[in-house]
Image: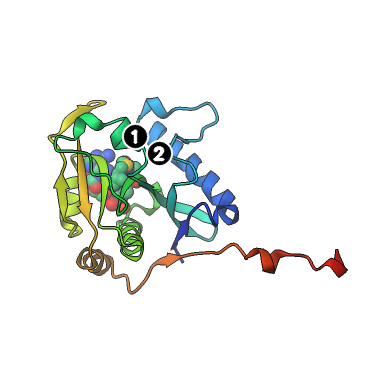
Amino acid sequence: MTCVHVITHDNRALYEEAIQQFYRLRHQIFVEERGWGGLRRPDGLDVDDYDNEHAIYLLAIDADRVVGGQRLYPTLLPHMISEVFPHLVQSGIPQAADIFEWTRYFVVKERRTGRTDCRLLAAMQEFCLEKGLSEVTAVVEMWWLPRWQQTGFKVRPLGLPQIIEGQPCIAAAIEISAVSLEHVRKLAGLRGASLVRQVTPSPSVQRVPHAAA
Ligand code: A1S
């Protein structure tokens, strides 16, 4: 059964293998499949400046295998829109404690039937609602707009589309709402929460008693 796991700096140690799979899949999908040559690395891993302690990963995992993923990053820190794509924004880059940037979204080829995609979209909305976020921002190719409309997401363009690597792209903000979450859940026939969190045991649980040391 596929579940979407929340991975942050606090529980990352429990997910090192999944994170490595995520980096490898990102390289396979974004560099080899999508042709984003600027991300190519000799080690076959897509890792960038935003894969740091502030990144939050929501990974769809089935029997230890990563089948899809996405990354959220605080907009109060320098992020992709502020550092790489500021020219896509005409009316001020949204930067606030309750706005995160959304990047590196994918589903592995064998799972591209829409259901894992909806699971990931629902997980993103669910996580953001739990965390009290109001919006996520993203830079996307234009074909995302009808997809988001279909999933009931409310989208606010941040500027006019521009060509990036031959593709018309746009920066946009997506509203986080219980209505959007319900809509995407219904679309995929998902019932209830889809997020899983493994928690690193607290130091008191890990501590070895002196007598046994
Ligand atoms: C940044 C993203 C942010 C959100 C963070 O009938 P079809 O096959 O034409 O239906 C397709 C198309 O309408 C459209 N579509 C998908 N990829 C497209 C592309 N490269 N160019 C134009 N249109 C595209 O979506 C429909 C369904 O796609 P699918 O692949 O058959 O199935 P699914 O399960 O909905 O998966 C969609 C995604 C995008 C997740 C999957 O294709 C994928 O992982 N692609 C590679 C990663 C990627 O491009 N991510 C977006 C940039 S990150």
Q: Quadrant of residue 125?
A: bottom left
Residue located 34% across and 74% down the image: 192
Q: Secondary structure at mark 1?
A: loop
Of residues 92 and 140, which is closer to you in this image?
92
Mark 1 lies within 8 Å of ligand 1 (Cβ measured) = yes
Amino acid type indicated by mark 1:
Arg
Q: Residues within 10 Å of mark 1 (few under 14, many from 20)?
A: few
Nearest to N terminus: mark 2 or mark 1: 2
Amino acid type indicated by mark 2:
Ile
Q: Quadrant of residue 195?
A: bottom left
Of residues 105 and 90, which is closer to you in this image?
90
Q: Determine which residue is flagged by label 1.
A: 34
Of residues 41 and 100, which is closer to you in this image?
100
Q: Is residue 56 above or below residue 125?
A: above
Mark 2 near mark 1, Cβ–Cβ under 8 Å? yes
Q: Is residue 82 above or below residue 55?
A: above
Tell me which image quadrant ligand 1 sits in. top left
Which mark, by number, is residue 29?
2
Residue located 45% across and 34% down the image: 48
Q: Secondary structure at mark 2?
A: helix
Residue farthest to the left? 160
> Could one spot residue 167 in this view of the protein?
no
Of residues 9 and 210, which is closer to you in this image?
210
Mark 2 lies within 8 Å of ligand 1 (Cβ measured) = yes
Question: Does residue 207 appear to the left or right of 14 in the view shown?
Answer: right
Marks 2/1: CA–CA distance: 6 Å
Percent coordinates x, y for residue 120 in the rendering: 35, 57
Residue located 52% across and 51% down the image: 9
Residue farthest to the bottom? 191
Rendered-image quadrant of the C terminus: bottom right
